[in-house]
């Protein structure tokens, strides 16, 4: 079979919610720059998605999957940690 896949499941730390909330704040701060391209529904969906993900991380009720595909590389992929 050409290529191989490496599936890893991690349980993210609760403090991963900080970047999500920072992205949401940055999005809100710069909304006026993209408001002409997107509508209010898009803004609300983005805010909702970021908030729900942050809440799930805080509650430790979310898994993070990392999938690495490598084409033409035999064997296992060892990710640097």
Image (cartoon, helix red, strand yellow):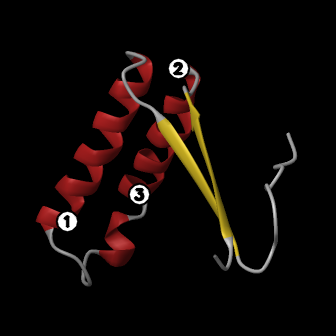
In the picture, residue 28 is in which quadrant? bottom left
Label 1: element kind: helix
Whole-percent x, y for residue 67 in the image: 58, 55
| Mark 2 nearby-residue class (10 Å; few <14, some 14–19, many ≥20) | some
Label 3: element kind: helix
Seen from the viewer's position, the closer of residues 55 and 25 is 55
What number is the disc on residue 14?
Answer: 2
Give how far apart the Cα atoms at labels 3 and 2 are. Answer: 22 Å
Whole-percent x, y for residue 56 in the image: 35, 26
Residue at horizontal 54 percent and vertical 26 percent from the top: 11
In the picture, residue 50 is in which quadrant? top left
Give how far apart the Cα atoms at labels 1 and 2 are. Answer: 26 Å
Give how far apart the Cα atoms at labels 1 and 3 are. Answer: 11 Å
Q: Is residue 48 above or below residue 15?
A: below
Most extreme residue toward the right is 80
| Mark 3 nearby-residue class (10 Å; few <14, some 14–19, many ≥20) | some
Identify residue for label 1: 42
Identify residue for label 3: 27
Which quadrant is the C terminus positioned in?
top right
């Amino acid at each position: 079979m050409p290529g191989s896949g490496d599936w890893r499941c991690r349980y993210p730390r609760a403090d991963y919610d900080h970047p999500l909330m920072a992205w949401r704040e940055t999005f809100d701060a710069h909304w006026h720059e993209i408001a002409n391209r997107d509508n209010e529904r898009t803004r609300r969906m983005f805010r909702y998605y970021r908030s729900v993900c942050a809440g799930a991380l805080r509650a430790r009720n979310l898994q993070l999957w990392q999938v690495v595909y490598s084409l033409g590389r035999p064997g296992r992929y060892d990710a640097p940690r």
